[in-house]
Amino acid sequence: MKEKNRTCPICYGSIEEGVTIFTVKAGDCILVLENVPASLCSVCGEKWFSDAVVKKIEEIASSVKTSNIRFEVRTFSAA
Ligand SMILES: [Zn+2]
């Protein structure tokens, strides 16, 4: 894990670990990922993802991109 108890670089609010919804355009598809682990600012709502999570999101996005799906909702799984 990365360092904890950071403060938000935008508003200096406290950052907490949690889950969020992440939406990304992958080719012609709108991909919505639920339950994505992220660091969330409790004040302004800014969010950050770990490198491992970003890599997994890219994997899911590229698998969706090669399909003919236009809209996809998935629950994020790190497995
Ligand atoms: Zn903030």
Image: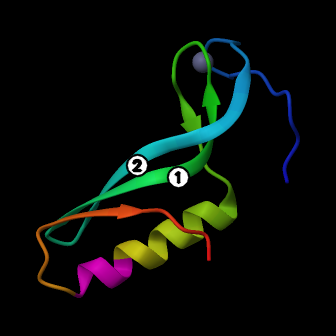
Q: Range of the magenta residues? A: 62-66
Residue 9 image position (x, y, % from top left)? 68, 22
Q: Of residues 43 and 72, which is closer to you in this image?
A: 72
Q: Is mark 2 within 8 Å of ligand 1?
A: no
Report the residue at 67% width, 66% height from top. Answer: 52
Q: Is residue 74 magenta?
A: no
Q: Quadrant of the C terminus?
A: bottom right
Q: Is residue 63 magenta?
A: yes
Question: What residue would you read off at disc 1?
Answer: 36
Q: Quadrant of ligand 1?
A: top right
Q: Is mark 1 within 8 Å of ligand 1?
A: no
Q: Quadrant of residue 75?
A: bottom left
Relative vertical location of residue 43 with respect to residue 4 in this rendering, above or below: above
Residue 15 image position (x, y, % from top left)? 71, 26
Relative vertical location of residue 29 with respect to residue 38 in this rendering, above or below: below
Name the dominant secondary structure of the magenta segment: helix
Q: Quadrant of residue 10?
A: top right
Crowd around label 1: few <14 · some 14–19 · many ≥20 (10 Å): many
Specify whether 13 is left or right of 19. Answer: right
Question: What residue would you read off at disc 2?
Answer: 22
Specify whether 68 is left or right of 55. Answer: left
Q: Of residues 71 and 12, which is closer to you in this image?
A: 71
Mark earlier in primary sequence (2, 1): 2
Relative vertical location of residue 38 with respect to residue 41 in this rendering, above or below: below
Report the residue at 47% width, 78% height from top. Answer: 59
Specify whether 30 is left or right of 18. Answer: left
Asked if marks 2 and 1 touch (Cβ < 8 Å), the reply is yes
